[in-house]
Image (cartoon, helix red, strand yellow):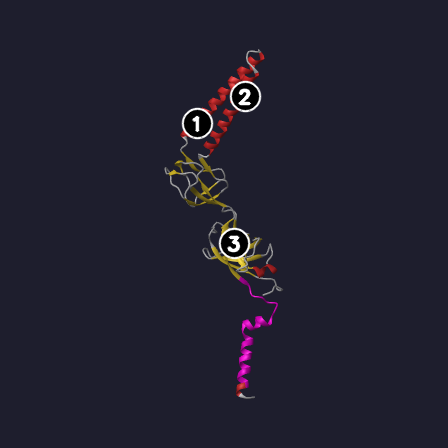
Amino acid sequence: MSPRALAGMVVALTALATPAAAQALSPLVLPEREIRAQVTARTSTVLASGMAGRIVELPVQDGDTFKKGDVLVRFDCAVQEAQLARANAVLEKARRVLEVNEKLRQLGSISAKEISVGHADVAEASAEVGMMKALVSRCAVVAPFAGRVAGVSARQYQFIGEGQPLVDILDDRELELEAIVPSRWLAWLTIGRRFQVVVDENGRTYEGEVARLSGRVDPVSQSIKLYARIRQPDDRLLAGMSGRAIIVPPPDAVP
């Protein structure tokens, strides 16, 4: 055998000995897929002011936890509360007048028209009370769910206009993973498939489970968004963290 032929044989055998070549010769062994994933809160919102007024209570700070129904912001509502008291007084007056008129009607002292007007007065006063109660209810911003404060945009004693953001909150009990994967993975990436994710910030590994997929594929990037449930989260996992999601496809998956 010539030296050139011998050298070619050595190169070929060396190539076959590499892991990449061995993997290519074994079609049943597919490499694991690694993508970036981000931890997000399934439920989050920004609470805004329902009225214009001065903040008198702001008991929470960024990072604080709270329960459902806790008051997060309270406004100075002395004027609104006084207007509600006045509306209640007007309603009570209308009811008493109607009550007296109904007794007089039984005696034939007043007409049916006056009774109808009395009922209308009571309805009008009742509607005024309902409107003032709705205004007073805006004086306190309560938590719609239990969770954690992710940001505070206002300050105590500050005058806030209607619609301005106050507190950014999220439910840290229901964290999930979001990732963008190639749409061709849909051939084998199904709901319920589990995978591992290594979070950069705390170095811990968690198990994820595909919960749902986006209803649309991006035709430009040929990708789709994946949402996964974190099976055993802990207190060291926070929304906004990110890491490497390692997904192992089934043996018969198309590369």
| Residue type indicated by callout 3 | Glu
Residue placed under numbered mark 3 in the picture: 178
With respect to residue 117, does 171 lie above or below?
below
The picture places residue 147, in percent across and down from the top left corner, at 48, 44
Q: Is residue 137 above or below residue 28?
A: above
Q: Secondary structure at mark 3?
A: strand
Q: Earlier in the sequence, mark 1 or mark 3?
A: 1
| Sequence-first disc among 2 and 1 | 1
Q: CA distance from mark 2 to mark 1?
A: 22 Å
Q: Is residue 167 above or below residue 213?
A: above
Quadrant in which the N terminus is drawn:
bottom right
The residue under the point 49% across, 23% down is 91
Measured as percent of width and height from the top left, residue 134 is found at 48, 32
Residue at the spot of label 1: 83
Q: Which residue is mark 2?
A: 119
Q: Nearer the viewer, residue 232 or 117?
A: 117
The residue lying toward the viewer, choosing from 120 and 153, is 120
Asked if residue 188 can be seen in this view, the reply is no
Query: In this image, 253 relative to 69: left or right?
Result: right
| Res 242 seen here | yes
Q: Nearer the viewer, mark 2 or mark 3?
A: 2
Range of residues picked out in magenta? 5-33
Chief secondary structure of the magenta portion: helix
